[in-house]
Amino acid sequence: MSLPRLATMVATFTALVLAIAKIIVGFMSGSVAVIASALDSILDMVISIFNNIAVRISESKPDYKFNYGKGKIEGLAALFEGLFIIASGVFIIYEAIKKIIYHETIKEIDVSIYVMLFSIVVTGGLVGFLYYIAKKTDNLIVKSDLLHYKTDLITNGAVLLSLLIVKFSRFYYIDFILSILIGLYIIKEASEIVKDGFEILLDVSLNFETVEKIKEILKKEPLVLDYHCLRTRKAGNRNFVDVHLVLTPDMKLKMAHMIIESVDEKIRALDSNKKWVINIHADPYDDSHINKLLEECE
């Protein structure tokens, strides 16, 4: 089992445990913040299940129908997850406003405090695990889950704070106020996930640092006179690179092939955890001006 799939499975189980605990205590206490947090954990579980399926699909090998693989499912998953989280944020705000209107109060505060402490400890452990997997694999689905559970960690802390304030001051409105702030924060963070998903679907280039490293490899490669039409994109665990190299016009095919192989190997070495699809075109002269006229690199 791959690390991204393991991460989504652990996230699903964790969300299930937290959701059950929060639902029971939330309805016992009547706390909007706890119920909102329980709803968020249910959404976490559903999304993590979906993410597990998406990771499995994105890791499938290219075939006769999908020649470049199905890595863009990561973009769809991130888009779905982001919109789902935004909807939950809107619902939390709605519930908080409704509770304010009907002047509902919290019961069983002590139990609510204990379950939120438990939630913070468990979620903190999950965030640490997901951070490790995200850093090791650079998988967008895992990064989305990480961002989601980091948001949960912050919201759980806010819920705990509101419960403590209510317990010692009896200022019940803090529960509703923090619930609205939690909803707004969730919407803001989810917007970033939606943005990342759109970028993958629109073939966003590799990150700036990676592109600059690729340029350095091209500039330092012996016998490469120049390069142009460098294009990059990503899909799932695959990085795509296309580039034209300008070589000496009378160079033998075998030598040109050796140079291309050298460039290919150096680019792949930038991140051995990724699968690279590299297409290098050899030119006997710089034809970038022609490509600019055509507004494309062929």
Image (cartoon, rainbow, N blue to C red):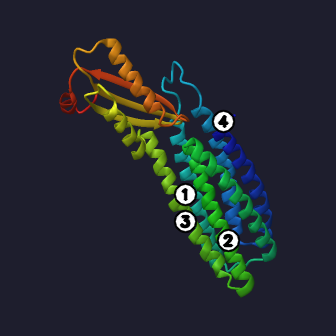
Residue 86 in the image: state x and y as whole percent.
55, 57
First reached walking from the N terminus: tag 2 or tag 3? 2
Residue 86 tag number: 1
Q: CA distance from mark 2 to mark 4?
A: 34 Å
Q: CA distance from mark 4 to mark 3?
A: 32 Å
First reached walking from the N terminus: tag 1 or tag 3? 1
Residue drawn at the location 42% of the way across and 37% of the way down = 233
Residue drawn at the location 29% of the way across and 32% of the way down = 229
> Which quarter of the rendered picture does the C terminus lie within?
top left
Q: Is residue 171 above or below residue 160?
A: below
**Tag 2 secondary structure:** helix
Marker count (numbered): 4
Residue 64 in the image: state x and y as whole percent.
51, 18
Q: CA distance from mark 2 to mark 3?
A: 13 Å
Residue farthest along the front direction in this orientation? 222
Q: Amino acid at mark 4?
A: Ser
Residue 18 picture quarter: bottom right
- Residue highlighted by disc 2: 159
Left or right: 185 as drawn, with respect to 22: left
Q: CA distance from mark 4 to mark 1?
A: 29 Å
Q: Is residue 152 something that shows in the picture?
A: yes
Q: Amino acid at mark 2?
A: Val
- What is the crowding at mark 3: few (fewer than 14 residues within 10 Å), some, or many (at least 20)? some
Residue drawn at the location 63% of the way across and 34% of the way down = 56
* Dots 4, 3 in contact, CB < 8 A: no
Residue 2 tag number: 4
Residue 185 tag number: 3
